[in-house]
Amino acid sequence: MAVTTPDGSTVHTSLGQGWGRSFDMKWVIIGLCIVVVAWLALIPLGFLIWQSFASTSTAQVPAVFTLENYATAFGTTDSLGLMFNSLKFAFGTAAFALVLGTFFAWVNERTNTPFKSLFFAMSIVPLIIPGILFTVSWIMLASPQIGIFNQIFRDWFGLATPLFNIYSLTGMIWVDGLHYAPIAFLLVTAAFRSMDPSLEESALMSGASVVQVAFKITLKLAWPAILAAFLILFVRGIESFEVPALLGLPVGLRVYTSAIYDAVHSYPSDIGLASAYAMALLLVTSLGIYYQSRLSSQGSRFSTVTGKGFRPRVSDIGRWRYAAAGIFILYCIFVVALPFLVLFWASLQKYYAAPSWAALHNLSFAAYGKVLAYPGFYGVVWNSAKLAIGGATVVMLLTSVICWITIKTKIPGRWVLDMLASLPLVFPGIVLGLSLMIFYLNFDIGIYGTLWIMLMAYVIKFLPYGMRYNSTSMIQIHKELEESAAMSGASWFTIFRRIVLPLLKPGLMAGWIYIIVVSVRELSSSILLYSPGNEVISIMIWEFWQNGQYIELSAFGVMMITALFCFLMVVQTLSKRFGVKDV
Amino acid sequence: MLSVENLSTTYQAPGAKPVLAASNINFSVPTGRLFTLLGPSGCGKTTTLRSIAGLERPSKGVIKAHDTVVYSSAGNIFVAPNHRQFGMVFQSYAIWPHMTVFQNAAFPLQVQKKRLSGKDIRDKVMKVLAAVSLDHVEEREATRLSGGQQQRLALARALVMEPRLLLLDEPLSNLDAKLRDKMRFELKKMQRELGLTTIYVTHDQSEALALSHEIAVMNEGKIVQIGSPRDIYERPANTFVADFIGTTNFVEGIVRGGTDDRLVVDTRIGQLNVNAQPGVSIGANVSLSIRPEDVHLSDTAPAPSSNSLFIGTVRAKVFLGECQDFKIDVNETQLLARAHPSVRTLVGEQIHIAIDPEKCTLLAA
């Protein structure tokens, strides 16, 4: 028992009540977390804004205030086309993904279509096939020069001109839309599940057909959620880097993300212009996230992936169920089977060739050996592992404290903290990379060009994910569990370490695993931050592509997909045993 | 041992005006006594308990335990809950699901300032687990205990630290009726044997009456009456207490006359003799509280005494085994009565009623 003196020297605040005046471990840790989050979320953004108003500095001429960047970025017909392209691409991608995803969600939740159980397994596909590999595989399938589809149509039907051209806006929308459809599927499924089934059943009893119910009741009721899903997909689309860079840039079809990359990598690099583009991009993503959060019901800023769990009866759609299953199988072929097979095929070749009887005789595993013997291969893998595990650990621990503050305490202004930690949602990866790059180039504290700056980018980028995973778990911890520990005499730090963190474990582990997986495939921030010797896996794939080493790329890609798949399978098996939430 | 002086606690709901959840609470509890805060939900009893625990920060007042001030608004003193050494049993029990029974009970000893050896901890924990008959399940996961066992584990965890004060927040409310009766008995036995000063919060009046040395009845953030269980039950200070503590008949009337120790009150059921109370004068409007079990019924006219006598008509009766409940019309006013099963009068017949002046509680109208 602490003896309390009248001058209050051992005074402590009660759990989650107001501010204390004493020096306490609790306040050190909380204060540190607040400072770190504020630093991470605000500094790059602030500097980016400043930079967008500065002229390019050279050795002779220092940077001065200017609006010229904005004039170049917005004032020319060229720039109007850029904005138009970006919006068209994002809109098309979101619409295509949403139509596919909503259709699959409805089929899965409301009809008796066969193979339904495979739908959820499909939803992890974007996790295990990184965007860059998916894009590359579609180039191999549908490019006018080497695309297998085009060759088949040429050889079998004698078409003179290639039928498909992946290097087009339609091609870009097709590839990204296919890839994002599972996200739409998960979002809309959640909305369908949280819907009272009696609303649809009463329509059915009123004599409406299954399709009428779907259009007049189900979709109408889910409309806010579907619109929110659309905005999420739209933001994803406008942030997308791999597809515009690989499919758009070669034919001069530029969107904001690829224009930023272009501006930085042209010579001399135009940071001011890139910053102005980045500001435009930020404006669009901020608006998207803002309206999405307003649409999402009751304060939940994030997609509601868990619902109340209604299980309505499924409708018999008769023979149409085979058609639905057919569409689904076709989708699986387009998204998993063909991309993986084409990469696998390419990886077995000595020189890239389309599948043929002749090429079949040249199969070898030489490419795999070549990749494994590649200089720096193990260093690259080790870099990725360090960044993924380090980033995931930092994010989950940091956000566990932040979530504790925002959910368990009544500290005034805690919403600011919540907002700061969710702010990176509006940073497209390339913008984040750009802002960190120019900030740490100007304020040299020795992390530019090292792994540390990439770690910082990953931590910032995945803070919102950490918040989402931790907050859903944190809400479920009854406050009396902490209070009883305090009554038992435990300090704040002990309570946090021995009660809160162990109880948080399901969400903590799920978020940790998720962040590891998405870190390994992160490209759009890394592309501006890596330096020779500090490459990561996704950068190595990018370099293979730039160098035209398609065979090595394919072999590497196959290994990566297999490794990610095995990792997720092991994790799912383990998590069933240890009660970790689904990733 | 525990004294609470002028305690007020405001509760700040998010986005709402602050609410004075407990205002101007005063009471003291001598060592070894069980003191109950009783009242309906929202009356401020839990807020008061949590203020004593240190889980809420009061806005005003002084809380002293064993002559140590743990809170004083004037002295700017607030001892953190983890430094108060009060044991507490929560309504949800707050058993940590990621620990075994033993780990749950050992936690307070592991985190306290005074370091104990593993063997000492083990001895103390096993002793307290034995006291609540949980020593045979020490290695079990805490979540696999039944409700009653969880409640006992929560108690063991509160007791193992040898608390200076035991705080119980509706500890029996999550148990089923049968288990609740059993645990109530065990809790009382244990509290009396250990002589542990205890503050008990409940909304269940029979629990409060059965367990407590003293009860404070609370309503709308204030203590409306403090007294022994018998006091509270037999002499409720006002209609709220009388109504809350149990079923009762309220009879309105006007004081017509009386002597130094007796008053005669004119009511709609007739003239009632009542014990005199200081401050009540002739002509005052009063309200009387008469418990159903104090309305004596008999098939034949009782012998004359100081009791007020009436004749009424039985409107309904319910046989409950060890007693019967009657509804009786007396001069067109309904009285509830609880009588011995031997009373045979049938519904519709006339019955004799006797009311002891001692049992009529005079409430201000």
Image: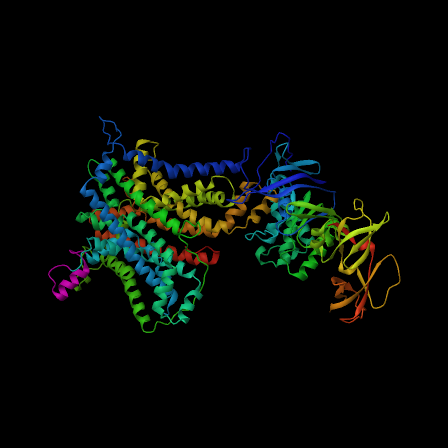
Q: Residue furthest top?
A: A60
Q: Is residue B326 magenta?
A: no
From the viewer's perspective, tell me whether residue B228 is left or right of residue A557: right
Q: Is residue A126 visible?
A: yes
Q: Is residue B224 above or below residue A58?
A: below
Q: Quadrant of residue B148?
A: bottom right
From the viewer's perspective, tell me whether residue A44 is left or right of residue B29: left
**At 26% across and 38% down in the image, what residue appears?**
A276
Question: Which residue is more in the foreground, A288 or A478?
Answer: A288
Q: Residue furthest bottom?
A: A318
Q: Is residue A262 above or below residue B320?
A: above
What is the x, y in percent for residue A212? 34, 67
What is the x, y in percent for residue A179? 29, 56
The magenta span reads: A143-162
What is the x, y in percent for residue A268? 20, 35
Question: Which residue is more in the foreground, A382 or B365?
Answer: B365
Question: Which residue is more in the foreground, B296 or B214?
Answer: B296
Question: Which residue is more in the foreground, A196 or B1?
Answer: A196
Q: Is residue A458 above or below residue A323?
A: above
Q: Is residue A159 magenta?
A: yes
| Quarter containing the N terminus of chain B | top right
Colour scheme shown? rainbow
Q: How many marks?
A: 0
Q: Quadrant of residue A256?
A: top left
Q: Is residue A558 visible?
A: no
What is the x, y in percent for residue B259? 86, 49
